[in-house]
Image (tube, rainbow, N blue to C red):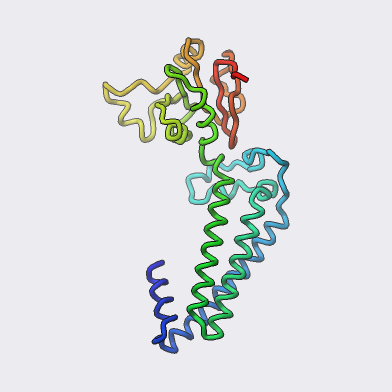
Amino acid sequence: MALLVGAWLARESGAAALEPDRRAGRISSAALFVFGVLGFVAGMYLLFVSHRPVPGADLADLLKKNPQEYNLSLGHVLDLTPQALGAFRVPLLGASLGLFLGTGLNWFLRRRGRPFAGNVALAAMMVVLLGCVHASFGTFSPILSSYNLAEVVRKQFRPGDVIVIDGEYSDASTLNFYTGIQVHVLHKPSGNLWYGAKFPDAPHIFETQESLAVLWNGPAEVFLWTDQEEPKELRGLGSFQLARSGGKFIFTNRRPER
């Protein structure tokens, strides 16, 4: 679709463009401007109802949880609250203004017979929109990723220590990715790991409540990733909270060094 639209824009803005193409460009620019105005109004409304969060607040504490929607594209959008929107005020303002000015300039320039300049306005608008999206993903990344937790674990990890994921491997696969260390999973074999776990030479990475207790009371330091502030798996075991980010936690069986 992008290639087809790009080819049409190039033909319509060329010196040899036919009048029907130019007229279609003016009509489409007017329709796009209407979309830009609607996007600007929606963005200004969201900006108005948003509340600036307290400095240092964890974004996860400002969101409303809808785990039943997370398998859908953009399912996390439903988590946003007025308080959470406050963390996105700058990219929200930038995207709203970019939509309004980009589509408005495109419409204005095409009505003046300058379709190439209108295309430049659209390209500049897309640069602004993509920049705002990228900044928003950076703000939202602690919710989607365990990078911050992985950095804490990586700095404290010593040979012989163990990292355990409380739940499905996919819940914290970025912990494995960013540390480069093999992780254990406190869960029955499932998901993408189920088939490989059936091979006789598969490494032992799946833990049970009983095996976790043995590890926890053993000589090695154990780092437990969990999305529970008080994980039931650690009841009766001495534990210390090492890190917290994006509604996820790292607990350890050793008192953190200060």
**Image check: 192 left or right of 83?**
left
Q: Position of residue 252 (x, y in %)?
A: 55, 20
Quarter that holds the C terminus: top right
Compared to 72, does 116 lie above or below?
Answer: below
Quarter that holds the N terminus: bottom left
Q: Quadrant of residue 177?
A: top left
Q: Position of residue 129 (x, y in %)?
A: 55, 61
Residue depicted at x 55% and y 46%: 138
Residue depicted at x 56% and y 31%: 227
**Image check: 87 left or right of 187?**
right
Which residue is the extreme one toward the bottom?
19
Residue depicted at x 59% and y 19%: 256
Residue depicted at x 52% and y 81%: 27
Q: Position of residue 94 (x, y in %)?
A: 62, 60
Compared to 70, does 45 lie above or below?
Answer: below
Which residue is the extreme one toward the left?
200
Compared to 54, does 21 lie above or below?
Answer: below
**Image check: 257 left or right of 9?**
right
Q: Position of residue 66 (x, y in %)?
A: 58, 43
Q: How many marks?
A: 0
Q: Quadrant of residue 18?
A: bottom left
